[in-house]
Image (tube, rainbow, N blue to C red):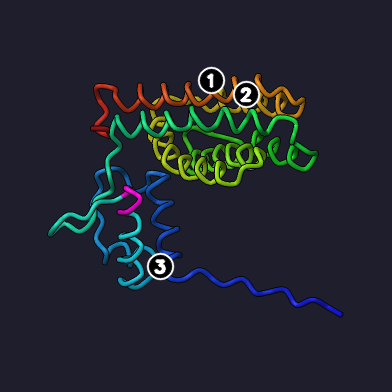
Amino acid sequence: MSMVLPLETPPSLTEQALSALRREILTTRLRPGETLSEAAAAQMLGLGKAPVRAALARLAEEGLVQAVPRRGWVVSLVTIRDIHEVFGLRLLLEPEAARRAAGRVDAAALRRLDAVCACGYQPEDEESTHAFLDANKAFHVAVAELSGNGRLARQIDRLLDESTRMLALGLRRRDRTGEMAHEHHALTEALALGRAEEAAAIMREQVAASHAMVLAALTAPDSATVI
């Protein structure tokens, strides 16, 4: 007897708007401080105002936009406190996830991580930057999922969304992608060999270096991005 698989429910218009607007913000196509009206967002996405309004309200709950009377919506600025809090939490959670993931990497997972490490990057190409950041997030999420703790992986996933926007802004001022790719390879090797403490140490160094890069880039004298 053949088994009928349930059909996937297509995302609602609000979910479509939410996903599209979140990506525009996280990739900094919509830059911090930029004003966005519901009408302009609806036109950009080819959707009605109602799902866009609902999506913007959700993004406000996430802290990515703010409602401003008579101006519509403004993409939230990145604060120095945001940087410290997001990367501080990553430093608490991700080394532990890497420690737990060590020795749990099967052949399929290794190929998945290696493919992420091989992502090409061209600093002058905006799409290439976004592709690299997507791959970087996918790598860190994959490691978190290999920890075997679903709640830990979900928390890290949410933190990575916030830090991706910070990295997108920081990489415009300093390209650290080569270092990050090298660290990915070293971490993959430590995970495959079951070297838990080495994996945790490499992850801690990578997150700390990204924190320092973002902080230096976004607090430079000519940067108007952070407050």
| Residue name at image x 46 percent, y 26 percent | 210
Q: Secondary structure at mark 1?
A: helix
Q: Secondary structure at mark 3?
A: helix
* Relative side of 196 to 213, left or right: right
Q: In the rendered image of this protein, does residue 173 appear above or below residue 51?
A: above
Q: Position of residue 124 (x, y in %)?
A: 47, 34
Q: Quadrant of residue 193?
A: top right
Range covered by the magenta-colored residues: 60-64
On residue 14, which mark appears? Answer: 3
The front one of 166 and 59 is 59
Image quadrant for the C terminus? top left
C-alpha gap between disc 3 and disc 2: 39 Å
Callout 1 amino acid: Glu
Of marks 1 and 2, which one's residue comes earlier in the chain?
Answer: 2
| Residue name at image x 56 percent, y 37 percent | 136
Q: Residue beneath label 1, please?
A: 205
Q: Position of residue 149 (x, y in %)?
A: 62, 42
On residue 37, which mark appears? Answer: none
Callout 2 amino acid: His
Q: Position of residue 198 (x, y in %)?
A: 66, 19
Q: Secondary structure at mark 2?
A: helix
Callout 3 amino acid: Thr
Q: Residue beneath label 2, please?
A: 182
Q: Residues within 10 Å of mark 1 (few under 14, many from 20)?
A: some
Of marks 3 and 2, which one's residue comes earlier in the chain?
Answer: 3
Tag 1 and tag 3, C-beta contact below 8 Å: no
